[in-house]
Amino acid sequence: MSLSEQPATIPLVDLVTQSRNIKEEVLARMSEVIDSAGYILGKQVAEFEEAFATYCQVDHCVGLANGTDALHLALRALEIGPGDEVITAGNSFAATALAIHYCGAKAVLVDVCEDDFNIDPEAIELAISSRTKAIIPVHLYGQPAKMRQIAEIARQHGLRIVEDAAQAHGAEIDGKRCGSFGDIGCFSFYPGKNLGAFGDGGAAVTNDPELAQRMRLLRNYGQVVKNRHDILGFNCRLDSIQAAVLLTKMKYIEEWTERRREVAQWYREALSGSELLLPGQREDARHVYHLYVVRHPLRDQLIQFLADRNIQCGIHYPHPLSRAQPFENSPTFPEHLPRCTTFAEQIISLPMYPEMTRAQVDRVAAGIREFSSVAQVAAT
Ligand SMILES: Cc1ncc(COP(=O)(O)O)c(C=O)c1O
């Protein structure tokens, strides 16, 4: 096939189309920030915090510079520090465990469930020690973790819960939104997230007014009033410009989420009966498909085969966190994280974004079926 005959690229994520569709609205809101010069903690930040708290079904939202800061400040607000242990999933993005280490605490990494890629409540129980202070369940790929079981374990052992909902805006269990189950819920608005800024952004949500107030101090140099610093604070506020972008996008988040769920349904139909292991969709949960992650034993060959056909895929994430240098000494339960390790070798993130068309999904599925028949011939 000549270059001119190559089909158009199907990207893993398409931010260009979405931004083009809302550009004028976003620019109008950004102009308001520029005209008022309220760049830092301007009225757009307060407006966004109110809208996002309502969306998450909680009382308070604190706008922050990114999702990593949200996790870090949440743990600081809960007074987690040196000597403490925090249990989290071994298959998350590094930021989850980094935030634990920023506080001087130790990340304890546990294995995940076969059905939803999320932290395994039984493994959490194995990992609890006298030093354990908190659990960070991660709602990976947009699928809620088993929060009711996790909340019960936390209650029995007197542990705090910080939800890493960086990939799970609008995800639910029985109608209750992710971020509202634990003491604090943490979100990222990194551009590729389901609700993404035009740069970095993040937020922490909570029903506890004291925790919210502590995080407001922590994000603003620990300043109670100008030049009075009562605690060791940081500078990690959400920019007004980013809040203006997010406020505009809030209008569309539900529509985009439903589109993602429809794309997932198309994948399910188009790939049923294929060799791929498709993502489980729990009856009680609303998966918001930040990523559509499948498994295949010949993962690397399949990714290359699809790339040759202009279909871009990703791997989230290629190694368990225990393989990363900062967490080499982190305890693991069960030892060596058998499921995280297998998943890391087999997972593929297929293209997923709200603007994806049925024809694009069908082209991805056709590529996968073609790969299976070629691989079968090669094996005989
Ligand atoms: C699961 C998870 N946790 C934390 C983060 C950190 O968020 P940020 O990149 O906004 O710092 C991300 C996203 O990058 C993530 O996917």
Image: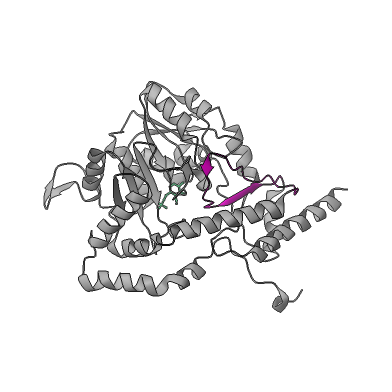
| Frontmost residue, 324 versus 175 | 175
Instruction: In the displayed orientation, state which residue is furthest to the front.
Output: 175
Color encoding of the figure: one colour
Where does the image place residue 305, in percent across and percent down from the top left?
A: 72, 59
**277 in magenta:** yes
Residue 228's place in the image compared with 85, above or below, is below
**372 in magenta:** no
Numbered range of the magenta stretch: 273-297
Where does the image place residue 142, in percent across and percent down from the top left?
A: 51, 47
Secondary structure mainly formed by the magenta segment:
loop
| Frontmost residue, 94 versus 14 | 14
Quarter of the picture holding the N terminus: bottom right
Quadrant of the rendered structure where residue 13 is?
bottom right
Q: Name the residue: 39% across, 22% down.
A: 157
Q: Is residue 178 left or right of residue 74?
A: right
Q: Can see residue 301?
A: no
Q: Can see residue 375?
A: yes
Instruction: In the displayed orientation, state which residue is furthest to the right.
Output: 380
Residue 154's place in the image compared with 74, above or below, is above
Residue 345's place in the image compared with 152, above or below, is below
Where does the image place residue 136, in percent across and percent down from the top left?
A: 42, 36
Quadrant of the rendered structure where residue 85 is?
top left
Q: Name the residue: 83% across, 50% down.
A: 376
Where does the image place residue 314, in percent across and percent down from the top left?
A: 59, 55
Q: Is residue 355 left or right of residue 362?
A: left
Q: How many marks?
A: 0
Q: Name the residue: 50% across, 56% down.
A: 257
